[in-house]
């Protein structure tokens, strides 16, 4: 039997889309770590650091709202190419940053560039996630497996990007790191433009923007749960924990900064890689092949409440501690790794359910709406990360995360397999 006869239909396009998404997310993770650590060493406060990522997340909300319609109208390949190309331009623009600028000018400039990068990221993400629904085989739980592989591998690559960004900052500096990533991503874009296999839809002229808003209660409830789930992660992930670790690890010297950058980048990378590894194996962990959609909805509720317990325990540890003690730092590292593993199962379940709830003809619309909610959660988490850490330290930041996860778990409780209009 030939390879083409045994290969699932659409697999070549799936592989090409996944490879392009990997390349994008490597630069996305590296860029986040570069910006965070570089500007922290320039004297930016936690709130100012959070501002650097605000437009990135606002752009994600607006992009996802419109990207589903754009893809439905012009085709998934067009949004994928646009995302890759815009990221190249954003990286080139960021290399023009002048260290002599005033802090206010630097903040505005980086916010604008990060906004463009946010648009790029969500164009690429929406294209990749929608492609899975259209390309995956429908039998034997294949949809969940293909979703888990794409999402899990993406996060493992992004985790490597966090480490890459920290290492590049320490070894070659901010400008050369950004220019090198732009060059590599430009090569990837050119290769995808030349070699993209057929299999993705070209778009339909009659697609209306009003179709973006779903009439399915399940899609809407799941999107609401996503807001609080990802808000809970970014409350600690974006600013608070990296800055806490920097305060613990660095003595303020150049060598001390380099060592701190490497250790912070390593932790963030390991966290995201673990997260991605668990995501990729979520169907096996959940025994999804043997379970109905109703069972998986119930699992989403159970895993949601399990996740809420982790930051709650860490909050108590932070309240008990009187400062940055070693035992607290070790507890945070262990607790956040556990959070990452449980969070990964929750995220993977949500990613599968959104594709299960939608129909093929409106997949880009529902996926775009869902990831608009995802970006909204990241925006809220980004703002709260700087604000809560500056106002109340670790305890307030982690307590906020625990509360947001609890709200997400409550919202998932409204999902039902009997409420699937798929409209």
Image (cartoon, rainbow, N blue to C red):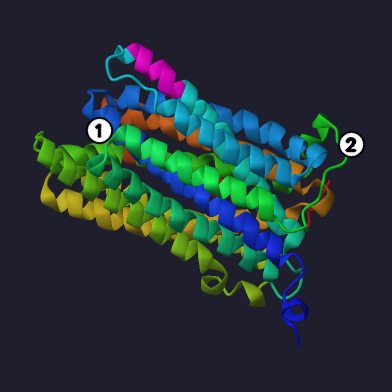
To which residue does mark 1 refer? 393
Q: Tell me if residue 370 comes above or below residue 334 in the rendering.
A: above
- The dominant secondary structure in magenta is helix
Looking at the rendered image, the disc whose residue lies closer to the viewer, 2 or 1, is 2
Viewer-nearest residue: 342 or 95: 95
Identify the residue shown where x is 51% and y is 60%.
152
Q: Is residue 265 left or right of residue 110?
A: left
Work out whether mark 2 precedes mark 1 in sequence or the reverse, and give the earlier one: 2
Q: Is residue 370 visible?
A: no
177 sits to left or right of 2: left
Q: Quick check: 277 above or below 422?
A: below
Which mark identifies residue 205? 2
Question: Which contiguous range is marked in magenta?
Answer: 104-111
How far across and how far down the image is residue 51, in percent?
A: 40, 23
Q: x, y percentage for residue 213? A: 76, 35
Q: Let me know if residue 419 appears in the view.
A: yes
How many residues crowd around disc 1 within 10 Å: few (fewer than 14), some, or many (20 or more)?
Answer: some
Report the disc number at residue 355: none
Q: Nearer the viewer, residue 333 or 87?
A: 87
Query: Residue placed at 69% from the left, 40% from the top?
Result: 79
Q: Between residues 147 and 158, which one lies in front from this camera angle?
A: 158
Real-space Cα distance between discs 2 and 1?
Answer: 52 Å
What residue sits 69% from the left and 45% below the top? Answer: 367
Q: Residue at 10% x, 33% y: name it.
A: 252
């Amino acid at each position: 039997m030939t390879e083409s006869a045994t290969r699932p239909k659409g697999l070549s396009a799936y592989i090409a889309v996944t490879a392009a998404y990997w390349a994008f997310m490597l630069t996305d993770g590296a860029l986040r770590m570069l910006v965070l650590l570089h500007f922290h060493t320039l004297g930016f406060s936690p709130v100012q650091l959070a501002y650097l990522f605000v437009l990135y997340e606002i752009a994600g909300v607006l992009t996802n709202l419109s990207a589903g319609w754009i893809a439905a109208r012009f085709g998934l390949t067009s949004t994928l190419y646009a995302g890759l190309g815009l990221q190249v331009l954003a990286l080139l623009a960021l290399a023009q940053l002048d260290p002599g600028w005033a802090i206010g000018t630097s903040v505005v400039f980086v916010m604008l560039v990060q906004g463009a990068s946010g648009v790029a990221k969500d164009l690429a993400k929406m294209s990749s996630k929608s492609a899975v629904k259209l390309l995956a085989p429908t039998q034997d739980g294949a949809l969940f497996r293909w979703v888990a592989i794409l999402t899990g591998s993406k996060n493992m690559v992004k985790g490597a990007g966090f480490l890459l960004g920290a290492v590049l900052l320490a070894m070659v500096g901010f400008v050369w790191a950004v220019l090198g990533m732009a060059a590599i991503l430009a090569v990837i874009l050119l290769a995808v433009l030349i070699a993209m296999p057929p299999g993705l839809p070209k778009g339909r002229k009659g697609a209306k923007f009003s179709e973006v808003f779903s009439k399915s209660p399940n899609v809407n409830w799941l999107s609401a749960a996503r807001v609080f789930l990802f808000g809970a992660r970014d409350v600690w992930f974006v600013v608070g924990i990296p800055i806490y670790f920097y305060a613990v690890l660095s003595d303020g010297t150049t060598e001390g900064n380099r060592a701190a950058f490497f250790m912070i980048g390593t932790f963030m990378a390991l966290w995201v890689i673990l997260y991605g590894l668990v995501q990729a194996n979520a169907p096996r962990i959940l025994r999804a092949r043997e379970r109905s959609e109703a069972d998986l909805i119930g699992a989403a509720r159970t895993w949601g409440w399990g996740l809420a317990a982790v930051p709650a325990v860490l909050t108590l540890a932070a309240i008990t501690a009187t400062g940055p003690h070693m035992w607290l730092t070790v507890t945070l590292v262990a607790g956040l790794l556990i959070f990452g593993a449980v969070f990964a199962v929750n995220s993977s379940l949500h990613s599968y359910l959104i594709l299960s709830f939608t129909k093929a003809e409106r997949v880009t619309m529902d996926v775009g709406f869902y990831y608009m909610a995802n970006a909204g959660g990241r925006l809220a988490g980004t703002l709260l990360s700087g604000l809560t850490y500056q106002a109340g330290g670790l305890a307030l930041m982690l307590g906020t995360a625990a509360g947001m996860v609890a709200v997400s778990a409550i919202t998932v409780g409204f999902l039902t397999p009997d409420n699937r209009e798929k409209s």
